[in-house]
Amino acid sequence: MTVPRIGVTLGDPGGVGPEVVLKALTRRDSLPPAVYVVFADSRIVIEEAGALGVPGDFAPWRPGGEDRRPGLFLSEVPAPGAGRGGAKPEAANGRASFGFFEAALEAVGGGALDAMVTAPVSKAGWHLAGVPWRGHTEYLEHFYPGAVMSFWSDRLRVALLSHHVPLREALTKVRKDALLGYFRVLHQSAGRVPAGPREFLVPGLNPHAGENGLLGGEEEREIRPAVDAARAEGIDVSGPYPPDTVFRMALGRPERMVAALYHDQGLIAFKLESFETGVNATLGLPFVRTSPDHGTAFDIAGKGLADPRSMMEAIRLAVRFTSSAS
C-alpha cells in the first residue's frame, strides 16, 4: 500500500507541541493512512509519552527505507539542553524547535517527504536563540517569496496579505502590485484543492470599505485597481467589501475565501469561528505545509490539557493537499 509521507515537527518542547503531536499520532485510527515521521529528540518524545501514558517507541526513520507503507517513525534531531517544563520561552527550546523545523524542511524540500506539519513554536524562543525570523511562515517567505499564510476550517477559509508584522508596517503593504501578486498565489494554489475555494472576497481597509473615499482612499487607489487587474487575468476575485460583513459572505461557503489585508483582520473572525479545529496552511510553496492554528499555550503546557483537534485537522489537510497534488 503506497501512502503519503508526512513529516511532523515537535514544536517548542516547553509548549503544548509535544503533547498535541503525540495525542494526534497515537490516535492513528482517526487519521488517514500515511508514513508519519516525527522530527524530534527521542529523549523529549519518550518523556512526553511517559507523562501522557501513550506509546513513545517509534521506529527510526531511514529516508526511502519505509517502503511507503503506513507507520510511525522518528527522525532523530538532537536538542541539547531542551526539554519539557519551564512554561516560558527559553533559548534552548527555541533552538530545538528551529532545528526540528529545519530538518523536516530539508527532507520535504529534497523530496523525501510529501508534506510537513509543524507544531507551534515560540517567536520569543526563536529570538532568544538568535533565530532571525519571527516564525515558520516568515522563514518560508524569505526563501519562497510570495508565500501566503492561510487558514482553513469546515466553515471558513481566510488568507492573509501580511503576517506577523506590526499593524503600522502591515498597512504599508496594501499596494496594488503586492495585492495582485497575492491574488495570483491564491488563484494558483487554493484553487487546485478539490472542493477548495474558487472565489476570493477582498475586504476594505477602512470602515465601510472607505465609503467611496470619504473614510479613506486606499480602496480606490490600491485595492479596487488590483481587483480589476486580477479579474482581467481571469481570477475570480471581488471587492473591496465592508470588512465588518465580508466574513458573513464566506461563512459556510467552501467555494469562497476571504483575502484579508492584515493578520488580525482575518484571524479575529477565523479564530472566533474555528479555533479548536482550524488549520494554518502556507500557500505558494513547492511542497505542502500545514500547522495547527494555535500557539505554544505555555499556560497549560505539561498539564495534559491540550486539545489535539487542530493538530489532527492539520495532518488531515496535509494529506488532502498532497493527494490533490499527485
Image (cartoon, grey):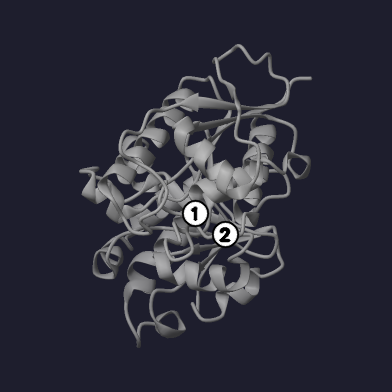
The answer to whether any part of residue 325 appears in the image is yes
- Side of 162 where 246 appears, left or right: right
Answer with mark 2 or mark 1, whichever residue precedes in sequence.
1
- Side of 108 where 276 appears, left or right: right
Comparing 305 with 11, the one in front is 305
Q: Is mark 1 on a helix, strand or loop?
A: loop
Expressed as whole percent of the image width and height from the top left, the position of residue 135 reads: 35, 49
Q: In which quarter of the image is residue 65?
A: top right
Q: In which quarter of the image is the C terminus?
A: top right
The answer to whether any part of residue 9 appears in the image is no
Please name the residue that numbered disc 1 is placed on: 16
Q: What element carries label 2?
A: loop
Comparing 23 with 293, the one in front is 23
Residue positioned 58% across, 28% down in the render: 114
- Amino acid type at circle 2 is Ala
Find out whether the residues at labels 2 and 1 contact each other: C-beta distance under 8 Å: yes
Residue 71 to residue 150: above or below: above
Expressed as whole percent of the image width and height from the top left, the position of residue 205 reads: 39, 74
- Amino acid type at circle 1 is Val
Comparing 2 with 13, the one in front is 13
Q: How far apart are marks 2 and 1 (CA)?
A: 6 Å
Expressed as whole percent of the image width and height from the top left, the position of residue 58 reads: 61, 28
Residue positioned 55% across, 50% down in the render: 19
Please name the residue that numbered disc 2 is placed on: 306
Residue positioned 37% across, 73% down in the render: 220
